[in-house]
Amino acid sequence: MSLADIGESAEKRIVYCVALAAFFFQFESFMVVVALPDMAREMHASAHAVSYVISGLLFGLVAALVGASWLGQRLGYSRLFLSGAYIATVATFACGIAPTLSILIGCRIVQGIGIGAIVASSYALLPLWVKSDRLGWAFGMLSTGAGTGMILGLPVGGFIASCLEWRWLFFGTIPFLLGLALFARFAMPPDHPFTHSISVHRTLTDTLKLPNFLTGLLVLFVFQGVMAGLRFLTPFLLEDQGNVSPTMSSLIFLSYPLGFLLLSSWAGRQADTHPPKRLMLYATSLSLIACLVYLLLMDTWGVWHFAVFLLILGSATGLFTAPNNVAIIRDLSASEIQVASALIPITLNASLLFGTFSFGLLSTQNDPRLALITGIAMFVGIIYTVAQHSSPTRT
């Protein structure tokens, strides 16, 4: 079987499977965040200690991404996807029955390894099996799945945490994971046409020399890092400036994934017929305008203005994500894609951690001015970089 032989229906099955995986990751992540206070109370742990429930997942995810190229080109990316689904299922059940916080964190690390294998496989399977002129649509569907998971994760997690024990957050997702594994066995193509022995070190070195690829990763790191920092600061600013309760804050914060969901699929389709770089410029300009308006009108900023601010930021992220992925991957060879499939999610997760940490340091006494000015400067830098960067013809 070759790329030309799989047909449009097989393409769609692959894309829908990857989109479901993205949905699960974001849905489960947002649900668990809501239940952290209940976990802390039951296990007699501090807020700092229970935060490792989140950090453990990210640690396992990044660890899996680091070895994804080596594993993918030996096991095959379809097998790696399935293996990740099985590992995540077993680890999710173990999280639900964990008797202590230490064991729960250890199970979350294993769960992260399984999810990391799924994520890395997803970024490899799409460009390997979806035709180039439909790649934007494919990445747009991935973003749509992630955005839907963000929107549903908060209210469902809040409902379960209020009405049931937090362990049901994990037990309730096991049937979904089993269904994902079953669908993947049906949807995933054989691995042999593209998966072959490569020198990961040599291919990594060659890939990083490509101007489009390296610039795309840099822009991804800066843009998503700034967005992560702004998302981190907003709930604190809501509660401080507007005296908003955590429940109301979470409802207002739903504006961000709503905006992301509204534009992510459309942006992916547009990336198939328009230059992805142009869409990235629109997204960055939209973010820049939102931050400038916030900075200029800060003294008169009301609580519900934050909903508009988050809606614009989410829309900009949705407009940016799929075109940026297309710009990075579209011209790569099969061997380069195997390396890029790990580097893109590694860069994304590193930017989220860096952005949250950096903007936390920049914000003093909940005054967002320095963070906003920094974000504005970063967005200007992205606009300049993308506008000036040319795509050399490869030989």
Image (spheres, grey):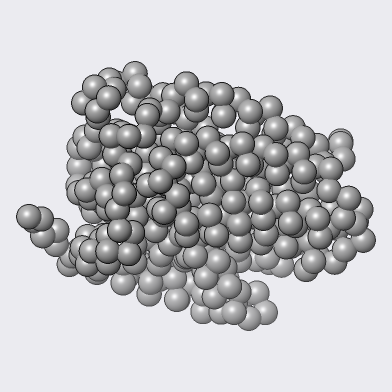
Please give left or right for residue 249 compared with residue 36 in the image.
left
How many discs mark residues in the rendered view? 0
Based on the displayed image, in which of its 4 quarters is residue 196 positioned? top left
Q: Check the image and report above or below for 313 versus 75.
A: below
Decide if residue 374 is in sight here.
yes
Percent of width and height locating residue 378: 38, 72
Q: Is residue 114 left or right of residue 337?
A: right
Residue at 48% from the left image edge and 41% from the top image edge: 80
Q: Nearer the viewer, residue 30 or 57?
A: 57
In the picture, residue 126 is in which quadrant?
top left
- Up-down relation of residue 111 to residue 201 (above or below): above
Q: Is residue 366 left or right of residue 143?
A: right
Question: Residue 206 location, x and y as percent?
Answer: 23, 64
Q: Is residue 315 visible?
A: no
The quarter of the displayed image where residue 170 is located: top right
* Image quadrant in which the C terminus is located: bottom left
Of residues 64 and 265, the one drawn nearer to the viewer in this rendering: 64
Residue 83 lies left or right of residue 164; in this view the side is left
For image coordinates 85% across by 66% down, the residue present is 46
Q: Is residue 372 above or below residue 9?
A: below
Where is residue 105? Give x, y as percent: 75, 57
What residue is drawn where x is 40% and y is 46%?
Answer: 74
